[in-house]
Amino acid sequence: MNRAVVFALIFVVWQVNRLEAAATDCLRTNPCTRPRCEFMYELKVAKARLRALNAGFLENPDAAADADFLRYLKDSYLPAVNKTYRKYAKCPPQYFYNKVSLSVSALPPGGGRCVITAAGNPSKNVSLEDALTMSSSCAEIVKADYAGAEEDQRACLSSDKGTQTGGVQEFRKAESQLQKTKIASMEAALLQYLSSCAPDAALSRELTKAGLSALLKQGQKIRQEARRKAKRARATGRGR
């Protein structure tokens, strides 16, 4: 079995890209605008998928045989992922929201460099700037997805060097790291937003329910410190 193909199919659920569009910021601070539904959905799903990966599914977690690996995907991981998607209602369809489909490929085919490619052009290395141009979704999500693809790329390179053993444990380790990378990227973008914009009650509840209370408090602390600095600066200016 070509596990690189399995990883490409399982790591991220992608939609068909729109070449004529470009990604746009969905966490806007000037003026402050509530984060788009798509951003919050992607963040909550990534966190839920990480929780599913950390749950115990297989009797023999070290199983490396293809049959055991496929059984893990069919009986454990994919049902958990599908449950995640059912739990979080998808956002209303948006013309603007189409993600570029990324994967990691060995070029030339059959071996060689592990490079990030896009659907429709599997022979070309895709940069983050390319992905942002090709996508019409949230720029913050594109950046998180690309960071995840870079984790996939590192796993591919590591596998080529023979440092991975294969099987369920390899998949769970690589997929967990990918999801952690995506979450870290999206949470960093969200913290930057919260450092400038005070969330309303509805957003505060949503973030708390998503397990992001610490991020809420950190953003509030940064806003308060910024106000104190501005107040001291004004006082110093008046005293001159």
Image (cartoon, helix red, strand yellow):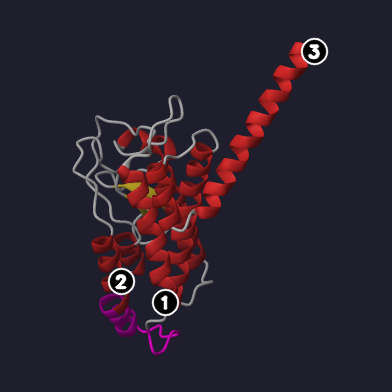
The stretch of residues the image draws in magenta is 58-75
| Image quarter (top left, top right, bottom left or bottom right) of the N terminus | bottom left
Q: Are marks 2 and 1 in contact (CB under 8 Å)?
A: yes
The answer to which quarter of the image holds residue 38 is: top left
Q: Which residue is mark 2?
A: 80
Q: Amino acid at mark 2?
A: Ala
Instruction: Please tell me whether residue 87 is drawn above or below residue 30 in the rendered image.
Output: below
Mark toward the start of the polypeptide (2 vs 3):
2
Instruction: Please tell me whether residue 165 is drawn above or below residue 158 in the rendered image.
Output: below
Q: Amino acid at mark 3?
A: Gly
User: Which residue is located at x 45 percent, y 77 percent?
Assistant: 169
| Image quarter (top left, top right, bottom left or bottom right) of the C terminus | top right
Q: CA distance from mark 2 to mark 3?
A: 62 Å
Residue 134 forms part of the magenta stretch = no
Q: Which residue is mark 1?
A: 55
Considering every residue shown, the one lying at the far bottom of the view is: 59
Q: CA distance from mark 3 to mark 1?
A: 60 Å
**Residue 87 seen from this side:** yes
**Residue 105 seen from this side:** no
The answer to which quarter of the image holds residue 120 is: top left
Mark toward the start of the polypeptide (3 vs 1):
1
Q: Of 1 and 76, which appears nearest the observer?
A: 76
Marker disc for residue 239: 3
* Label 3 SS: helix
